[in-house]
Image (cartoon, rainbow, N blue to C red):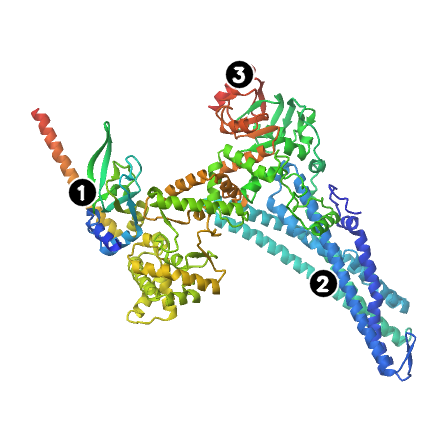
Amino acid sequence: MESGSIGAAMEKSLFKFVWKYSKRQQITIVLITTLSFPILYTTLELPKRIINEAIGGTQFPRNFLGMELDQIPFLLALCFAFLGLVVLNNVVKFCLNTYKGLTGERMLRRIRYQLFERVLRFRLAHFGKISAGEIISMITAEVQPLGGFIADAIATPAFQGGTLLVYLTFIFVQDPLLGAAAVALYPIQGYIIPRLQRRVNQLGKERVRNLRQLSDRVGESISGIREIHANDTTAYHMADVSDRLQTNFEIRFEIFKRKYAIKFLNNFLNQLTPFFFYSIGGYLVIQGNISFGALVAVLAAYKDLAGPWKELLAYYQMLADTIVKYDAVIEQFDASDIFPVERLDDPGDIDLSGADSIALQNVSYVGEGAGQNLDGIAATIPIPGTTAVIGGEGSGRPQLMQILAGLLAPSSGRAQIGDQATDTLPDSVLGRKLAYLDSSPHIFTGTIRNNLTYGLYHRPLPLLDGEEIDDALLQRRLTEAQLTGARGYEINLRWEDIDAAGVESLEALDERMIELVSGVGLGDDIYRMGLQSTVEGHTDSELSERILGARAAIRERVLSEPEFGEYVHLWTPDSFNRSASVIENIVYGLPVDPAVTPHDMAAMPEIKDVIRENGLHDDLVGIGRSIAETMVELFADVSDENELLSTYSFIPKDEISDYDALLNRTKNKSELTDDEAAKLIGLAFMLVPTRHRLGLSTEDFQEKVVAARAPMRERLDKDAPDAFEHFQADKIVPSLSIEDNLLFGRPRLDRPKAREAIERFIGQIVDEMSLREVIMRAGLEFEVGIAGSRLSTGQKQRIALVRAILRRPDIILLDGLVTGAPGDDPVLRFIKQVAPDSTVVCGMANADSAETFDYIIALQNGGLVAAGTYDSVQASLTPLRQAAE
Amino acid sequence: MSIDQEVEALQRVPMLRGIEKGKLRLLAFISERMVYGPGETLCKQGDIGDSAFIVLDGEADIVVDTDTGPKTVAVVGTNDIVGEIAILCDVPRTASVIAKTEVHTLTISKDQFLKMMSEFPEMTIEIMRVLAARLERTTRDLADVRGELARATANG
């Protein structure tokens, strides 16, 4: 099986790579192509026989596959044979092309996987030399053409070369001299073309480099976008990218010129040969040395040579280009010093439980930059216990912490846990028994829950009861992975390793997470996120049911206790909600698509009809007209840029003059066109009585609106069943947040601090009905944005801390997260509370709380100041304290 | 009560007296109507103010913290404005305002007010005129008081 490539070194040459991983496929391609030749030949041969023998022939009956046939049956037999062969030929071609595609795609998949595996094996320092933009561009774009090329890598030269040889042999057999003439210029072509090509290859390499820089620059501009705007450097970045594009243009143009120069030269030399044929061959014929017929035959054969020769040249250019790309990628990924593959694959059964210390034996480290060095650090960190690694800016503290975590390897000396050197431990030990955290943890795109359980995603596990996966699909995916040298890690299996969290079920895992986030001080944040999240997506009906239960309780309370009631306008089917818009009141619901505007709704035929039928049309037009008049009056001379207009006007600035015109045009008209009416009704729909106080929403009008609800519902259910979500006391409104679903009403806009009061009030009911945990679970589904962009730094740090604690590490390394003594520092207090047995090593900048730690390592300028218990190092800490001041 | 009544109330505010009706309508439109129950606090002494209140209906106590506890120093009623200095500059509230009956107010927020002033300079000039007049009066009063004080000291 050629799948045994896991962790193998990258193949340095493209052909070695092709041969190593696809020799069987390549041979199959060659074989199928060979087999297709006789078919092709016969499809060319048969028409000749049809014309000469079947149509033009005279001797019948004739023998066809052992049957005696007359002329017409013979013609039909040949024609059907021709048809059959054409079909067969195309079927073979189809199969061959599919197979080639399959081979190419598998190889492409393999190389991309290999490259990504390499990325995971790069040592951390390597990422200082190669940017994400470059790596992405290599793995995605640069290797792409390989897939197309690989399928033809052997077949094309074999066939076109073979064909060329056959023709040449034919020419030589006809006449050795003419044969010699035919190939006379090949040596010249063979000499000049590669020389020209070499320059093209160099340019190709430059192009690759240039593109990488371009993607690097684009990536950098994105991650530095804040600095760009804050420093007004957009022009500089545009110039920079423009410069890359200029270089790119120049390189490509140069390549084009040379590529076509090669084609030109090749075509010219190919045409030059017939010149010899006509001159020398003609002379020989006239002299009677060769026959006229032979010259014609040779000329015909030579013409056929041009086809394969051109193909070979195209192949040659493509090959050169592909090799350039392959080499350019491989040289970047072939870093000599990378983690051994065992670091990723080792099952991690090394036992560290007996270790009673982390020993630093003369650890030195030479960093890339200033202040990153360590020089001969010797210390013995006790397990279990609390240790402080004290060192300020430039002390090498972060490097030492990372060496302890096995993320960096010391340049010399050893860091050992028990008898294991940290830098040789596999990830399966480092990432399970140890936890390393610094002050800027990475939060992955996804939900908070994903980020909390992330530390449990070690290996895929069998699905739990009740979860299902299509077995055939799974099998197919695993087979394909195996065929392309990938590990059989299937993303659709279960990754949340509940055993690693020490719980029995997913339910218990949720409980544990909520306990931890509450403990770390994120409880209120998660609860609030839960309130703001929608019920959509949480299919579990328990949540919905409990929300509806709480909704009923809230309603009862609002109606019976005025201290709550006065903050809320509840949704009730038979009364107008003065804190909601007119259209919400008419539809008694919301459009499913939040992008649908009141104006869109005013144009809906269903809504128009019901409004007319219920006598609301004239009222709404009247209200719309008043609003339009007011807006024109209020905002006509407010300038465009002023926010007042965009915040408060019902009409955008650029439409104010349209409305003004509309008002003038229709001043004395009793009947408006449909379009004019809809424009005004759209405005009326936006009116929220308690906010806008225009005195337009009269009792009479409100009664009519309430009366129109039932017919509107009926009509919409019939003609636009999926366009709206209607309010119903016993149903969840999916697009509303949990909070709004609980309240089932609107905060009164004319009451100060209604929002806060309602939040307090909902909080009370939620606690009374013990709903808080359920809502927090919904909060765990909060989407954190790209790299956690919707979270604050503090939230990110806490999530990362919970993520680490959830998987129950024995040793916790915290760099820059702890500032105080174990008694007062919130992080240490939390760890003490939820993971009392763990060993904690804290990297901190100052020595203020040093006496509260069991063991102290003090660093300055990369050197060890002191290591030991507080009493033994106390004296040596003084200069450090002074330095800090 | 609709916007027209609010405009009438605004017209009675001395600081806004010279401002044309159209602008006052806009000011009313962008301000918020609030209802405070008896005993509810409109603003608290010492807080940074961000809005002014125009009492449309009801009464509110102006309460100042003293050494002997809170003390009501004045009562405001319909068409009075309280806290107007807060929407012109950042100063802590000099007193608390507590609703005595149910109080309806028009609440003008500082941000919106400043936006309007930047939009309509003539409005700013009008307000400046009123403030300058007030300052002039205060200065004169102060001079009088100083004069009296000097006389008293000289005679003393």
Percent position (x, y) of residue A541?
53, 48
Q: Amino acid at mark 3?
A: Gln
- Residue B98 or residue A801, whichever sits in front: B98
Q: Amino acid at mark 2?
A: Lys
Specify the label residue B134 is tagged with.
Answer: 1
Q: Amino acid at mark 1?
A: Arg
Percent position (x, y) of residue A880?
51, 21
Left or right, A159 with reference to B129: right
Residue identifier under label 2: A263
Q: Are marks 2 and 3 on the same chain?
A: yes
- Residue A869 or residue A142, whichever sits in front: A869
Q: Quadrant of residue A117?
A: top right
Q: Nearer the viewer, mark 2 or mark 1?
A: 1
- Marks 3 and 2: in contact by CB < 8 Å? no
Specify the label residue A412 is tagged with.
Answer: none
Task: Classify A73 as above or below B153.
Answer: below
- Residue B141 or residue A512, whichever sits in front: A512
Left or right, A337 with reference to A239: right
Q: Note whether residue A366 is visible.
A: no
| Mark pair 2, 1: CA separation | 91 Å
Residue identifier under label 3: A874
| Mark pair 2, 3: CA separation | 80 Å
Q: Are marks 1 and 3 on the same chain?
A: no
Q: Note whether residue A42 is visible.
A: yes
Q: Nearer the viewer, mark 2 or mark 3?
A: 3
Q: Secondary structure at mark 1?
A: helix
Percent position (x, y) of residue B15?
21, 47
